[in-house]
Image: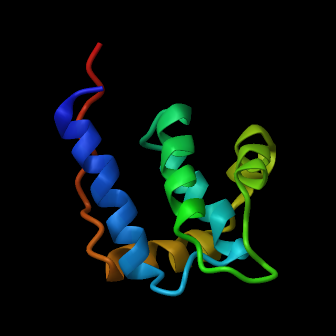
Amino acid sequence: MNEARDNFLRRFVEWVRKGYPTGVPRQDYVALLGLLRRKLTEDEVLRIADDLVAHAVGGGDAISREDIEAMIRGAIVQAASDDDVARVSAHLAAGGWPLADPPAIDG
């Protein structure tokens, strides 16, 4: 992975944390992962998911890496409604999410 792409992934996690200062709620992960899959590789999505899980606020509705992997494998990721995508996009925009595409993957 090139440095620009790696930096983009780090910044993405920062944007998510700013947009969701108390943690990403379970109902938003489906749309969030769906948005990510439009621009990132599955490995990159898992890397971001690991970081988000590691910094998640505890609670009964906490999400695990296994939950995220199941969402990625399942059709549920692609079934995010327009309202879900709009809600998650608003959270990302609040955290400073840029409108531009991420840097290209080397290779």
Q: From this view, report whether residue 92 is shown above or below residue 107.
A: below
Residue 94: percent from the left, percent from the top?
34, 83
Which quarter of the figure is the N terminus placed in? top left
- Please give the name of the residue rendered at 33% of the width and 67% of the height, measured from the top-left corner: 14
Query: Is residue 94 shown left or right of residue 23?
Result: left
Residue 23: percent from the left, percent from the top?
55, 79
Number of numbered discs on residues: 0
Q: Nearer the viewer, residue 104 or 47?
A: 47
**Which residue sits furthest left?**
4
Is residue 101 at all visible to an observer of this figure? no
Which quarter of the figure is the C terminus placed in? top left
**Which residue sits furthest top?**
107
In the rendered image, which quarter is residue 3 located in? top left
Query: Is residue 52 shown left or right of residue 9?
Result: right
- Please give the name of the residue rendered at 36% of the width and 79% of the height, measured from the top-left corner: 18
Is residue 86 at all visible to an observer of this figure? yes
Query: Is residue 15 shown left or right of residue 56?
Result: left
Q: From this view, report whether residue 56 is shown above or below residue 100.
A: below
Q: Nearer the viewer, residue 25 or 53?
A: 53
Q: Nearer the viewer, residue 103 or 69?
A: 69
Residue 25: percent from the left, percent from the top?
65, 78
Q: From this view, report whether residue 78 is shown above or below residue 98.
A: above
- Please give the name of the residue rendered at 56% of the width and 61% of the height, measured from the top-left corner: 54
- Please give the name of the residue rendered at 80% of the width and 42% of the height, measured from the top-left corner: 74
